[in-house]
Image (spheres, grey):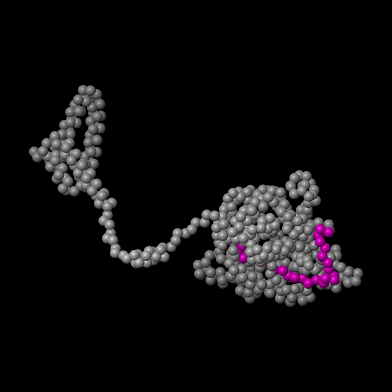
């Protein structure tokens, strides 16, 4: 019978296995020999399957070479296998060398001048990699440009809409109350002073009440039982010579003083209840509606100005989402204001104030015992509030104009940081403006290069004021701007700012 090389090799291996199994019966017995035979058979089948797969994948020439090596005699088995293995290794090595050592492209004959022109074209066509901001100065500049600034067209559009609303309200009041002496309404606040951040979403309209200087006088709250540095009482004078009824504002007297609450309630009732808001919205091309109970005060006048439904539909067709609508929504607060001499006061509820009789600045139980809190009593509701914002904003602008400083830029950055941080949100421009005014007395360099340094110093100064629980007003030191906060709120804000001392970048997220 004819046997090929593979079968002869297999018979030789089988003979060896049979010899081992026969001797194993003598050593380990019949049972152990059976187990050994089963294991040997399993190993043999695994070897045959692996050899069959390799034989199917290899070229035909290699198979014939293997047959010629092992066909003559079993003694040449070992030598034949070694030769085949060495040949396989040589072929694999040659293929790897061919795949790695690719032929080099033929060199182009380019002249030096042409080579320079080609390099210049490549350099111009390849954009430089983006530069990573690493310093606090660069991070602040990027944050200010991307998050803080309100685009000029957006601010101008908000001012224009507010002025249009003011014109309509003034015309309505003059028609409904022809005998009410009113001056021209004008804009005020951070939107007009370019101190608004993130979005142009709020502004203030001042309704000037014209009063007779010979019949009215302003009395400071510090000189009365109110003991509030920012409260004024408007007293009626010369009642024996000019009895009640000579002035239009005599209808709003309470105990011989002009009541801010009664004046505000009269204006609020006329504006919010009597005006035809759908007609006004149609004439202005935007939706205008009153916000009832703004700031928890029924006498407050606040209007919401938002894009009309037609504009919303056009934006939706253009694929724009509701974020732009949020940016265009504007809240307008209407404040009755009067001027007596050099003082300008408005009918607005003052913030909580506490007047301390001691001269120490640390919050201890001893000083707390001498502290009297003045809440919104009925007497305070008839008083007029003296706002120090115009002086504070004007001083910051004049200081920056004199030395080209960045005080207003630092103020806007701090306002944006506090507005976007829930813990620091109670801090407003009133607190931060006075903070920077106090810091201006200590720091002299307010150049653009010192922006990051002043920003860090402002955080450290604010932490110091929070620790003592007192931030005095720059023009009236008796006014403590931190008195309206509880101790828990002060502790939370102080902890957040303390973490930002070592890592200011956490505030710019």
Quadrant containing the N terminus is top left
Q: Indicate yes or no whether the magenta region holds residue 109.
A: no
Quadrant containing the C terminus is bottom right
**Which residue is at the far right?**
240
Which image quarter: residue 391?
A: bottom right
Image position, residue 348 (x, y; %): 74, 63
Which residue sits at x=82%, y=72%?
212
Q: Is residue 213 above or below residue 497?
A: below
The magenta stretch is: 197-223
Which residue sits at x=70%, y=60%?
295
Q: Is 88 positioned to the left or the right of 357 in the image?
A: left
Which residue sits at x=69%, y=48%?
467
Which image quarter: residue 85?
A: top left
Image position, residue 176 (x, y; %): 74, 75
Work out whether residue 272 can be spotted: no
Image position, residue 306 (x, y; %): 61, 68
Q: Is residue 200 above or below residue 225?
A: below
Q: Is 118 positioned to the left or the right of 136 in the image?
A: left
Work out whether residue 392 can be spotted: yes
């Amino acid at each position: 019978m004819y046997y090929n090389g593979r079968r002869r090799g297999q018979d030789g291996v089988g003979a060896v296995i049979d010899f081992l199994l026969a001797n194993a019966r003598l050593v380990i017995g019949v049972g152990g020999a059976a187990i050994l035979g089963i294991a040997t058979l399993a190993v043999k089948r695994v070897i045959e399957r692996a050899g069959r797969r390799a034989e199917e994948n290899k070229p035909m020439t290699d198979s014939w070479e293997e047959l010629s090596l092992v066909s003559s005699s079993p003694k040449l088995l070992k030598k034949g296998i070694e030769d085949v293995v060495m040949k396989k290794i040589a072929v694999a090595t040659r293929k790897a060398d061919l795949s790695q050592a690719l032929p080099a492209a033929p060199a182009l004959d380019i002249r030096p001048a042409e080579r320079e022109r080609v390099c210049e074209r490549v350099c111009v066509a390849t954009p430089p990699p983006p530069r990573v901001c690493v310093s606090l100065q660069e991070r602040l500049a990027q944050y200010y440009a991307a998050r803080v600034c309100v685009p000029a067209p957006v601010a101008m559009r908000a001012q224009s809409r507010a002025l249009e609303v003011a014109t309509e309200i003034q015309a309505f009041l003059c028609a409904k109350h022809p005998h009410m002496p009113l001056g021209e309404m004008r804009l005020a606040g951070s939107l007009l002073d370019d101190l608004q951040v993130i979005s142009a979403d709020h502004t203030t309209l001042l309704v000037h009440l014209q009063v007779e200087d010979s019949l009215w006088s302003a009395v400071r709250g510090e000189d009365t039982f109110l003991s509030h540095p920012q409260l004024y009482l408007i007293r009626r004078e010369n009642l024996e010579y000019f009895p009640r009824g000579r002035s239009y504002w005599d209808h709003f007297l309470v105990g011989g003083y002009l009541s801010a609450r009664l004046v505000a309630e009269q204006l609020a009732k006329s504006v919010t209840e009597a005006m035809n808001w759908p007609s006004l919205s149609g004439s202005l091309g935007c939706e205008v509606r009153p916000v009832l109970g703004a700031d928890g005060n029924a006498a407050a006048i606040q209007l919401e100005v938002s894009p009309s439904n037609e504009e919303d539909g056009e934006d939706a067709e253009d694929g724009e989402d509701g974020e732009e609508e949020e940016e265009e929504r504007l809240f307008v607060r209407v404040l009755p204001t009067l001027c007596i001499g050099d003082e300008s006061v408005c009918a607005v509820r003052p913030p909580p104030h506490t007047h301390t009789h001691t001269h120490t600045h640390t919050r201890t139980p001893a000083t707390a015992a001498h502290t009297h809190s003045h809440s919104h009593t009925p007497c305070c509701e008839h008083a007029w509030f003296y706002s120090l914002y115009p002086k504070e904003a004007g001083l910051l602008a004049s200081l920056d104009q004199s030395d080209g400083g960045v005080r207003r830029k630092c103020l806007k950055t701090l306002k944006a940081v506090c507005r976007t941080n829930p813990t620091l949100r109670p801090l407003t421009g009133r607190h931060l403006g006075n903070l920077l005014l106090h810091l201006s007395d200590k720091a002299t360099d307010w150049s653009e290069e010192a922006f990051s340094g002043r920003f860090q110093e402002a955080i450290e100064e604010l932490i110091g004021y929070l620790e003592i629980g007192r931030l005095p007003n720059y023009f009236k030191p008796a006014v403590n701007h931190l008195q309206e906060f509880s101790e828990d709120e002060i502790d939370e804000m102080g902890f957040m700012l303390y973490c930002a001392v070592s890592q200011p970048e956490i505030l710019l997220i």
